[in-house]
Image (spheres, helix red, strand yellow):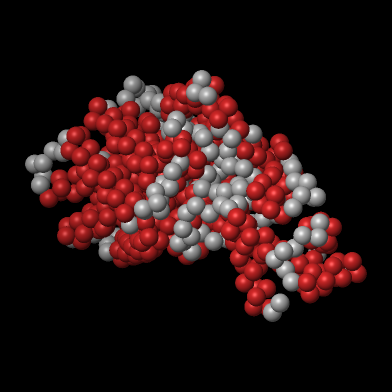
């Protein structure tokens, strides 16, 4: 066998093995590459635009100093569980992302629901923000216009339906579309930072920006700092987006963890850079803190031209809108994966891939329908609506940390070989710190932002979290999911039950492969085993079982059989 043939077979088996490890043959077209996946993760996260909405919160908790240092602290706290998540995504790549039956069915079921609730509320938040911003921009044009809640809801519906149409009807172009959205976001980020830095010669002193602490939250300074770090972690609730496209990219065990880590680090860099540019440009923090649209006051204080301010606000609104299709795409894939594993009512219907569009249309439409109905809460009470979407941060980080905690209980030696390997010592430290951080901040997420508090300013995230947990338990016990939900089948679990004496066709049936796919996979696996049998004793033993003792190799020539047997026996 020539070297090019060996390389081709190696890449084919490595790519396909990642998908088969989750227990499923390829169901989705592989249209994403590493760069388009990274662009997708960056576009969905778009940390700097989320920072623009959190600026007044940081200023309330500690003034300039809090707004400067909190983004760094929250980024570091979020990167740690992201590393653990990236390792798990490398070990078990699937559209389900962070939930897996290696954590037992109940744990996998719970983590799956946490992730689904996270993304449903993320879709709602990424859609309501541009709807509100659009109404505010209209108010700038027409000062006498007073947008009502139902009008904002109708804008919300338009953006949601637009995103749904893109996900369903433009599926083949989504990698390119997300790449365009990514570059648009990064270009807007650079424009905002340079404009804020250069437009106004009057700047805040460095001592003010980095050291001026003014806590108006009513909490003690230490508590205020921790609560603000928790709010800053909202920017990183989307770091698992790339994991839910694992079945739409070749070599997901390699590319998905890369996308997670790179997107998270870039989010931290953009977050800090945008915050510093805004803080140096701000002239009056009291005006920013009292504003319903803080970014407008930051821009108007820094830029003397009203037209330039309006142009930047419209650009910011477009970047916000561009996050909606990616969030919906992610949610639909996650809901589809969960339905495929029997986790939802009418799972066969929602776990179906459309033959026409090659996407999980039913799962995507289910996600859209939920968000449309949920948005009606905004008309009745913005407090209730904001409480629900704020709980996304709790569900997100619990879904990142629970699998890592269960991994610690099971032992890190249970992980299969993987591209992104944190190692025994460093990996254990990452998992422990992730669990501790998320446990602490999950409690802090439920505290009110300021004291004394009132009915309208109270934080009801704890109520939502408890109610969601009770509904998950009821679905597990009373909804029959304890019997029907099995989760994705792991290749490692299947291999444990394989009898070395059975034929390769029997093994293929155990792996749920179609005959044609089984033939291709069997031949290529045997070829790769042959290649590595002369290099690694670990592969030699496996090859000896499959190839020498069983004497079944209908896909290799007699010369290859003889050469392989002589090589193994001589070693």
Q: Reply above or below: 192 against 330.
A: below
Residue at 72%, 64% in the rendered image: 554
* Position in image of residue 458 (x %, y %): 38, 25
Q: Is residue 558 left or right of residue 14?
A: right
Q: Is residue 70 visible?
A: no
In the current view of this chain or complex, which residue is farthest to the right?
570
Q: Quadrant of residue 258?
A: bottom right
Q: Name the image quarter holding residue 412.
A: top right
Residue 70 as seen in the image, left or right of residue 326: right
Q: Nearer the viewer, residue 329 or 386?
A: 329
**Residue 251 x, y percent position in the rendering:** 57, 60
Residue at horizontal 64%, vertical 45%?
490
x and y percent of residue 292 in the render? 26, 40
In the image, is residue 527 above or below residue 112?
Answer: below
Residue nearest the viewer, comparing 19 with 215: 19
| Viewer-side residue, 270 vs 67 | 270
Quarter occupied by the C terminus: bottom right
Q: Position of residue 403 (x, y in %)?
A: 61, 39
Q: Is residue 448 left or right of residue 303?
A: right
Res 289 → quadrant: top left
Q: Residue at x 83, y 61 (%)?
A: 548
The residue located at (27%, 62%) in the rendering is: 200
Q: Is residue 514 visible?
A: yes
Q: Quadrant of the N terminus?
A: bottom right
């Amino acid at each position: 066998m020539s070297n090019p043939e060996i390389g081709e077979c190696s890449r084919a088996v490595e790519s396909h093995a990642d998908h088969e490890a989750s227990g499923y043959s390829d169901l989705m077209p592989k249209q994403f590459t590493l760069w388009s996946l990274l662009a997708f993760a960056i576009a969905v996260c778009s940390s700097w635009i989320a920072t623009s909405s959190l600026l007044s919160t940081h200023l309330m908790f500690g003034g300039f100093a809090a707004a400067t240092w909190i983004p760094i602290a929250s980024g570091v706290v979020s990167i740690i569980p992201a590393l653990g998540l990236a390792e798990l995504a490398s070990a078990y790549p699937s559209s389900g992302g962070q939930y897996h039956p290696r954590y037992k069915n109940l744990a996998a079921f719970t983590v799956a629901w946490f992730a689904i609730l996270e993304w449903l509320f993320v879709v709602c938040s990424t859609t309501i923000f541009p709807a509100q911003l659009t109404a505010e921009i209209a108010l700038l044009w027409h000062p006498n216009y007073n947008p009502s809640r139902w009008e904002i809801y109708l804008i919300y519906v338009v953006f949601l339906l637009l995103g749904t149409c893109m996900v369903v009807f433009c599926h083949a172009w989504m990698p390119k579309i997300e790449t365009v959205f990514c570059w648009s976001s990064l270009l807007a980020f650079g424009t905002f930072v340079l404009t804020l830095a250069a437009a106004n010669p009057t700047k805040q002193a460095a001592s003010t920006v980095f050291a001026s602490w003014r806590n108006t939250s009513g909490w003690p300074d230490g508590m205020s700092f921790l609560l603000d770090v928790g709010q800053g972690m909202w920017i990183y609730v989307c770091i698992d987006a790339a994991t839910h496209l694992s079945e739409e990219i070749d070599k997901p065990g390699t590319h998905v963890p890369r996308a997670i880590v790179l997107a998270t680090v870039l989010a931290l860099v953009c977050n800090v850079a945008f915050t510093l540019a805004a803080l140096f440009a701000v002239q009056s923090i009291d005006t920013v803190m009292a504003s319903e649209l803080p970014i407008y006051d930051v821009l108007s204080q820094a830029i003397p031209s009203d037209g330039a301010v309006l142009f930047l606000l419209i650009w910011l609104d477009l970047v916000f809108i561009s996050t909606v299709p990616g969030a919906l795409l992610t949610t639909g894939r996650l809901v589809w994966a969960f339905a495929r594993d029997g986790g939802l009512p009418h799972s066969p219907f929602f776990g179906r891939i459309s033959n026409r569009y090659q996407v999980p249309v039913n799962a995507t439409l289910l996600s859209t329908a939920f968000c449309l109905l949920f948005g009606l809460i905004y008309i009745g009470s913005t407090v209730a609506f904001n409480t629900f979407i704020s709980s996304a941060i709790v569900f997100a980080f619990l879904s990142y940390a629970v699998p890592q905690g269960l991994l610690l209980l099971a032992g890190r030696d249970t992980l299969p070989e993987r591209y992104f390997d944190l190692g025994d010592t460093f990996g254990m430290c990452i998992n422990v710190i992730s669990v501790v951080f998320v446990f602490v901040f999950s409690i802090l997420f439920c505290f009110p932002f300021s004291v004394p508090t009132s009915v309208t300013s109270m934080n009801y995230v704890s109520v939502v979290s408890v109610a969601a947990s009770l509904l998950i338990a009821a679905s597990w016990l009373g909804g029959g999911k304890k019997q029907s939900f099995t989760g994705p089948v792991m290749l490692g679990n299947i291999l444990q039950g394989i009898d070395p004496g059975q034929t390769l066709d029997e093994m293929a049936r155990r792996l749920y492969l179609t005959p044609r796919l089984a033939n291709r996979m069997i031949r290529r696996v045997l070829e790769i085993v042959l290649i590595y049998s002369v290099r690694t004793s670990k592969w030699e033993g496996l090859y000896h079982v499959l190839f020498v003792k069983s004497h079944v190799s209908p896909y290799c020539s007699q010369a290859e059989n003889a050469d392989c047997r002589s090589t193994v026996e001589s070693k």
